[in-house]
Image (cartoon, rainbow, N blue to C red):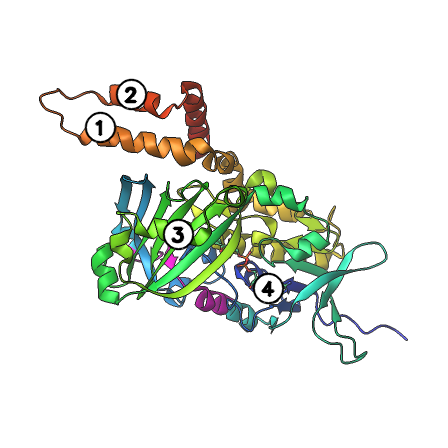
Amino acid sequence: MTAAPDPFDVIVVGAGPAGSAAALAVARAGLRVALLERGPFPGSKNMYGGVIYGRVLDQVIPNWWDEIPIQRWITRRGTMILTPTQSLCLDFRSQTWAGPPYNGATALRPDFDAWLAAKAEAAGSVLVTSTVATDVVRDPSGRVVGVVTDRPDPATGASTSALRARVVIACDGVNSFIAKAAGLYPGASEQAEHTTLGVKEVLRLPRESIEQRFNLTGREGADFEVVGCTMDVPGGGFLYTNLDTISVGVVLHLPGLAASKHRPEEILAGFKAHPSIAPFVAGGEIVEYSAHLIPEGGYDQIPTLAGDGLLVAGDAAGLCLAAGVWLEGVNFAIGSGLAAGATAVEAIRSGDTTAARGLAGYRARLEANFVLADHKKLRRVPEFLLSGRAQFQYPQLTCDVVEDLFTVRNPAPKQGIARLAWKSARRSRVRLRDLARDGWTAIRSYG
Ligand SMILES: Cc1cc2nc3c(=O)[nH]c(=O)nc-3n(C[C@H](O)[C@H](O)[C@H](O)COP(=O)(O)OP(=O)(O)OC[C@H]3O[C@@H](n4cnc5c(N)ncnc54)[C@H](O)[C@@H]3O)c2cc1C
């Protein structure tokens, strides 16, 4: 008796942005793809800060901006430095971002993820919800040939069942169980060192209040990234406008949090109470509280991206870009998902799904586009951003220089900026050697 052929060419685990993009690429190429999602619908279990950068969709969904379910188009972008008593904000606005092709948009994950998954379904993917992939299935040579799911097997009565395919694409997010089960990740403690915890509240406010407080009209939106607001824990904060809610949250380095005596909710409460943040959030009714991990290690922590019969994309591959002024993960997930889908199609057509040959083009594809190019350029940033100098000393130093600059001390005459900076540097005990080294890192990374 010959075995029945596999019902699918590709199995994608996780219907987040990476998974839906991968399934879309495979289905559009005419191959059979199953998209497994543990939640009752795509996006039901997912949280993030709130801003999506959609240009990655240009090649796959023309005029995506006409249909993408957004809350507001970002036209105001702030980068803020806080100390307990000071704040400095680079507050940028652009009307160019208020029309197609736009730049960024706030969107709610249940809306956005469901929309992208529906695109994959419309192209022919089979979306299977409320189903957890619990392990990989291997053939005798060790090649991944499918996944074990928590669905009962009607044929055998077993409590789990296996689904087989030529290629599995793991898009199951940070802490990817599938990538770990396949042996693509290092030890758990090492990973914690490069992981942050994001904690977020969604606050309901009347739409008019949001527009008044943030100085917005129509569907315009604001995005503030903040440093110096996380007490003694390295991290950062964010504040984004939705239509009639605000997303406010902090991102906290896991080892720093473990060593701190403060709890995440206390740090978030402190951020909301800061004199520069409180007026934005005052009176907001908490309608949602959530927490999620973020892989922040960057280029040097990216795991092996392919095994025999297996590819890894999105947060599962540590591809979230956390670089201070930028916190981008959804676009990197989509970019890597599309590349993984295209690589799987090529490999299946060539009849070779080994990591060494058929799937080897995946990394090259990512190196050739923004996904790994951006990570490579910014590879020194994660370590610098989470350092004590970037987190505590430089915010204080910068705010002190600006405060000195704007303080009028008549009858004393004004002092030059260089002299003020020198005095503040000495006060904050920043060593010139460190300042020069960090300045050089910044120029090489952002320059
Ligand atoms: C606090 C916070 C703020 C952020 N802010 C932003 C931002 O403003 N902009 C931005 O671009 N990015 C942001 N990010 C990063 C962004 O959320 C991620 O980079 C992005 O969601 C990664 O997409 P993904 O598809 O790889 O993984 P996910 O979005 O995590 O999706 C994984 C999917 O897999 C499913 N799944 C998991 N395990 C299994 C399993 N075993 N079987 C079946 N299904 C499974 C999950 O339910 C989920 O649907 C933020 C993240 C956090 C935590």
Residue, disc 3? 268
Is 205 placed left or right of 344 in the picture? Answer: left
Q: Secondary structure at mark 1?
A: helix
Amino acid type of the residue tagged 4 in the rendering: Ala
| Mark positioned earlier in the residue sequence (4 or 2) | 4
In this rendering, which labeled residue sits more in front, label 4 or label 1?
Answer: 1
| Mark positioned earlier in the residue sequence (3 or 1) | 3
**Along the viewing direction, whichever of 177 and 142 lies nearer the viewer:** 177
Between the residue at mark 4 and the residue at mark 2, the CA separation in whole angstroms equals 57 Å
**Along the viewing direction, whichever of 285 and 89 lies nearer the viewer:** 285
Residue, disc 2? 423
Write the residue at 28% across / 30% down.
400
- When the figure is inspected, residue 321 is found, relative to residue 245, above or below; the finding is above
Q: Position of residue 420 (x, y in %)?
A: 25, 22
In this rendering, which labeled residue sits more in front, label 4 or label 3?
Answer: 3
| Residues at circles 4 and 2 in contact by the CB criterion of under 8 Å | no
Residue, disc 1? 404
